[in-house]
Image (spheres, rainbow, N blue to C red):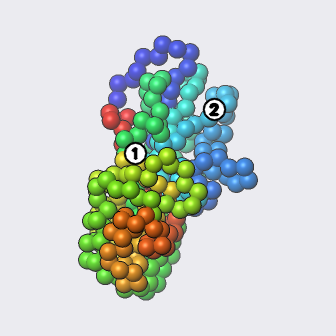
Amino acid sequence: MTQIPNTTSTRRILLTISYDGTAYAGWQRQLNAMAVQQCIEEALCKLTNEKIVITGASRTDSGVHALGQRAHFDTASRIPADRFAYALNNCLPFDIRITSSTEVASGFHARYDAKGKRYTYRIHNAPHASAMYRHLCAYVPYQLNIPLMQEALTSLLGTHDFTAFQSSGGTAKTTIRTLSAIDLTCHGSDLVLTVEGNAFLYNMVRIIVGTMLDIGMERIPPNAFDQALQTGDRRKLGVTAPACGLELTEVFYSIAQ
């Protein structure tokens, strides 16, 4: 990507971040627990001798992972933009990696300029749990009706009022969201759900997954998604799926960043 000329004393740097969220209290800095944001800010302080606050594209919850989280920060440091990734990775724990760093325009905002996001949710569906991937997927030992689940998910595509698809504590100004893609695939004993949308409510993807699984186990009607969209009633939906299976895979912007 072409570097943007610097005309001020500070530069804005955009990071792409991957992390295993198992050990962290989510993305956002917390008072009494370690968060991914705090780890990166402390590493930046060591590198630049500046007090830096980073702004993430998504506030992932405790135990949620990321392959393509984005965050920006401002700095007066003369470290070349593309070298921040290498320098930070020497300071960060091994479960947080900066996969790229680039200079962007001073007005760019990692959160508010995002046009959409892709999430991935992984499920291990077998008689016994996975020893190797226990922190990266949800475990479901019950038989699932996969075609029923795939059919039910199609009703979520498009623009809807997703009031029923958020946990208490959500602060979104509107519950209208657009899902542009949703796909459930099977790979042996592993199921992978990918969801793309312009934005997501608090715990929205995990509620979709929990409901999908309840439909697959035939615990709730196959039209549960439709009923919840029509009524806005959270009680029409299933449980909230575990955090460990969820990954923020990619954040989209109108131009490549």
Judge from the rendering whether residue 253 lies leftward or rightward of residue 93; answer left or right. Answer: left
As measured in the structure, the alpha-carbon distance from the residue carrying label 2 to the one carrying label 1 is: 22 Å
Looking at the image, the residue that sits furthest to the right is 32
Residue found 41% across the figure and 40% down from its top? 114
Q: Nearer the viewer, residue 69 or 174?
A: 174
How would you rate the neighbour count of disc 1 (Cα within 10 Å): few for under 14, some for 14-19, many for 20 or more?
A: many
Residue 1 image position (x, y, % from top left) = 34, 29
Q: Nearer the viewer, residue 251 or 41?
A: 251
Q: Look at mark 1 in the image and give the residue it sits on.
A: 251
Q: Is residue 69 visible?
A: yes
- What residue type is disc 2 on? Ile
Residue found 46% across the figure and 37% down from its top? 112
Q: Look at mark 2 in the image and give the residue it sits on.
A: 52
Quadrant containing the C terminus in the rendered view = top left
- What residue type is disc 1 on? Val
Sequence-first tag of 2 and 1:
2
Residue found 58% across the figure and 25% down from its top? 75
What SS does tag 2 mark? Answer: loop
Looking at the image, the residue that sits furthest to the front is 231
Residue 45 image position (x, y, % from top left) = 66, 33
